[in-house]
């Protein structure tokens, strides 16, 4: 029987559990619970002799670029059976996943990669970062007169979600989370997070999802934040003052975010550390949808010719004209005059503002004269893209 690429079926679950445990270690029951958090219709398998030998999971959501949510399918759980590795199976499977997403009109796909060359071969490129912060609680800013912070009950969780959704568009690269990512904010595996928020007129202005990680050797603990969201400076001040109140027994507050974060910016002196936890990679699956869905700098009025190479999705390849006005874009087939020449990976890196077109040119991802590079730089300018979520 030939190899088939298909959505998973119920009978595939035992084989999926083996694939996931062999790939990522951990107990089988945890792998099964994780597989079952996803709809099987979103799991893709390659079957050989009717048995899955590789898999990938599609997670529908959106990601903010230029202040607007762009439909994005996250990819997780990419695994090949240990006895089938090294023969191009993951590359072929991911090419099928990308072709399928493009045919469905999905604008973008994003993933955290264990190996970049695999995903580069199918058009993903490094396009943003997730940083790990560790700040001493005793050094956090305490601001007298800050707004009160109160515990969140289950009934408050929709308010927290609404608060996140008001805050997220301002953060380049942040997710418009789907149900899967939300399900991991308040409980992730065995870790349970409590909510504390700043209330204002029936809404939340900000909140944290907080867990205390005890250190038996000292009896002290760290504060682990699974979410820190603030929509106003007053909410940042209130949450910083609230967290600082743990200082007698808490050593550090640890969380993931972009390279800079309001909690550390508010600290009177520079203390604590930031390390890069994981870069993420992005794939432009559908060129016109991706370019038209994101936002652009409001003051820019420009037209840019693009000449794109894409071996996996031929419908993306060739010439396009991007016209940007009043913060939005229109894309048309064909171009006249000199065009910025770029691989689909180069488009990913400049689309998110991760690389300027000049930096992308140095990386061999983009080619064009100085005028084209400057024009593209103005169009795709934005804050450094980052994501606090991991999936
Ligand atoms: C990563 C994994 C999916 C690769 O599967 P595979 O079928 O062996 O990969 P392919 O044969 O299609 O290799 C494609 C490219 O990936 C890269 N790659 C594959 N295995 C690699 C390895 N062990 N180390 C580094 N790079 C690797 C190579 O660049 C390779 O291209 P090349 O052979 O032209 O150099 C597989 O090793 C696996 O399941 N690993 C454990 C789980 C994991 O890391 N999943 C990915 C999470 S993002």
Image (tube, helix red, strand yellow):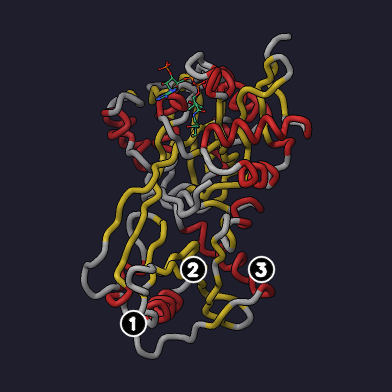
At which x and y percent is residue 329? 53, 41
Residue at 57% in and 24% down: 81
Mark 2 surroundings: few (<14), some (14-19) or many (≥20) residues within 10 A: many
Task: Check disc 3 and report its element: helix, strand or loop.
Answer: helix
User: Do we see residue 318 in this rendering?
Assistant: no
Instruction: Read off the residue under disc 3.
Output: 158
* Residue 325 placement (x, y as % from top left): 49, 45
Q: Nearer the viewer, mark 1 or mark 3?
A: 1
The dot on residue 341 is: none
- Check disc 3: other Cα within 10 Å, few if <14, some if 14-19, many if 20+: few
Quadrant in the picture for residue 36: top right
* The N terminus lies in quadrant: top right
Query: As rendered, which of 68 and 202 lies closer to the eye?
Result: 202
Give the CA distance from mark 3 to mark 2.
20 Å
Give the Cα separation between the discs numbered 1 and 3.
32 Å
User: Residues at badges 2 and 1 in contact (C-beta under 8 Å)?
Assistant: no
Relative image position of residue 68 (x, y in whole percent): 54, 51
Task: State the residue at coordinates (39%, 71%).
Answer: 221
Choose mark 3 or mark 2, whichever is in front: 2
Mark closest to the chain's N terminus, 1 or 3? 3
Relative side of 126 to 327, left or right: left
Label 1 SS? loop
Q: Return the residue at label 1.
A: 248
The extreme top residue here reads 1
Q: Residue at x 41, y 51 (%)?
A: 299
Please say whether residue 19 is visible from this viewpoint. Answer: yes
Determine which residue is flagged by label 2: 211
Q: Is residue 268 left or right of residue 382?
A: left
Q: Compared with residue 22, is residue 338 higher up or lower down, i.e. above or below?
A: above
């Amino acid at each position: 029987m030939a190899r088939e690429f298909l959505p998973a079926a119920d009978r595939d679950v035992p084989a999926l559990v083996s694939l996931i445990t062999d790939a990522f270690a951990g107990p089988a029951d945890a792998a099964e619970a994780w597989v079952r958090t996803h709809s099987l219709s979103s799991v893709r398998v390659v079957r050989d002799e009717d048995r899955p030998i590789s898999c990938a999971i599609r997670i529908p959501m959106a990601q903010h670029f230029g202040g607007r949510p762009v439909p994005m399918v996250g990819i997780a759980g990419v695994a090949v059976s240990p006895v089938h590795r090294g023969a191009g199976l993951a590359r072929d499977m991911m090419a099928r996943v990308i072709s399928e997403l493009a045919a469905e009109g999905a604008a973008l796909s994003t993933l955290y990669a264990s190996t970049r060359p695999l995903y580069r071969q199918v058009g993903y490129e490094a396009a943003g970062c997730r940083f790990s912060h560790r700040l001493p609680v005793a050094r956090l800013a305490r601001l007298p007169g800050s707004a009160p912070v109160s515990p969140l009950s289950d009934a408050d969780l929709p308010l927290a979600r609404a608060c996140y959704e008001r805050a997220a568009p301002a953060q380049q690269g942040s997710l418009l989370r789907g149900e899967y990512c939300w399900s991991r904010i308040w409980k992730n595996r065995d870790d349970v997070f409590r909510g504390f928020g700043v209330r204002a007129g029936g809404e939340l202005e900000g909140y944290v999802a907080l867990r205390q990680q005890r250190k038996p050797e000292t009896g002290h603990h760290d504060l682990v934040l699974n979410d820190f969201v603030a929509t106003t400076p007053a909410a940042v001040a209130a949450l910083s003052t609230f967290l600082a109140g743990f200082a007698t027994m808490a050593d550090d507050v640890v969380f993931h975010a972009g390279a800079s974060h309001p909690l550390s910016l508010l600290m009177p002196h520079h203390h604590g550390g930031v390390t890069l936890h994981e870069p993420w990679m992005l794939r432009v699956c559908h060129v016109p949808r991706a370019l038209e869905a994101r936002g652009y700098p409001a003051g820019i009025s420009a037209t840019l010719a693009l000449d794109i190479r894409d071996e996996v999705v031929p419908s993306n390849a060739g010439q396009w004209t991007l016209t940007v006005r009043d913060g939005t874009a229109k894309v048309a087939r064909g171009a006249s005059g000199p065009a910025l020449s770029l691989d689909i990976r180069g488009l990913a890196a400049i689309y998110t503002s991760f690389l300027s077109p000049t930096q992308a040119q140095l990386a061999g991802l983009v080619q064009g004269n100085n005028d084209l590079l400057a024009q593209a730089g103005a169009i795709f300018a934005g804050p450094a893209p980052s994501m606090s979520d991991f999936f």
